[in-house]
Image: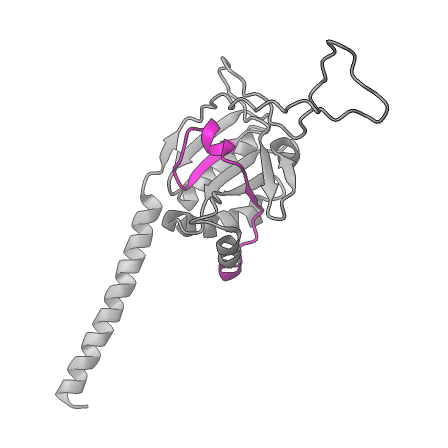
Amino acid sequence: MNKKTRTLLITVISFVVLIVVASVAYNALRENTPSVAFTPQVAALPPQPAQAPSTTNQPGTEPSAGQETAAPEQSGSAEPAETGSEEPKMPNLPFYTLDGKEILFEDIREGKPVVINYFASWCPPCREELPHFQRAFDAYGDRISFIFLNAMDGQRETKATLETFVKQTNFTGPIYTDEGLFGYVFQTNSLPTTVFVNADGTLANGYLGYVSESVLIENLEALLTQE
């Protein structure tokens, strides 16, 4: 091996070693970076628009003079958030499966503790933390309900971009969407946002931005001790 070839080989090996060391150092630093905790506070839900009474009469019938026609009941509406409570509870928000089926928060959690991860496929810290959320779902999914709430806005995030992301990453966690109520009641537009809910429905803890795997596991274990 001539001197030029040997020098080139040493340079390439040094570069590869540098990349590996930098990657290990970055991962270690990322894992030890403090997560930004916040105390979840639930804002009052926005007023629901009243449905106009039907003006269509049944065949052969007419409303009596001065009689009011009752508006149809709304199904699947979220329960009002509790106010004035020292321990605010997670409101019974409506979520939607990716095939468009509405399901309420209480029907998802089934009396178990819950972790809600608000994410988007285009969000770098979301993509970075989802692998250990996937591992947590695999390990704790029988004792804790997981809600992976996608911030689908029809522009940066669509059903197509989300489906592509799921296929590329082999993500198997349960994914839902909403109509913006989660961001509204928690007054957050931060992606990701993670909220932990105790088994009794009270809010336990929350984080804005990336959550390390160690912090995630610590909070999941804390939820189980509150049962």
Q: Which residues are magenta?
A: 167-196
- Residue 55 in the magenta stretch? The answer is no
Front one among 35 and 80: 80
Quarter holding the N terminus? bottom left
Quarter of the image for residue 100 reads top right
> Residue 114: percent from the left, percent from the top?
56, 35
Number of numbered discs overlaid on the protein picture: 0
Quarter of the image for residue 213 reads top left
Q: Is residue 125 left or right of residue 61?
A: left
* Image position of 2 with respect to 114: above or below: below
Q: Is residue 49 left or right of residue 18?
A: right
Front one among 171 and 220: 171
> Residue 43: percent from the left, percent from the top?
47, 22
* Residue at x-position 18% and y-position 86%: 5
> Residue 155: percent from the left, percent from the top?
44, 48
- Name the residue furthest top: 66
Front one among 169 and 58: 58
- Name the residue furthest bottom: 1
- Name the residue furthest left: 3
Quarter holding the C terminus? top right
Colour scheme = one colour
* Residue at x-position 54% and y-position 23%: 89
> Residue 170: percent from the left, percent from the top?
53, 59
* Residue at x-position 42% and y-position 40%: 215
* Image position of 24 with respect to 70: above or below: below
Q: Is residue 126 left or right of residue 6?
A: right
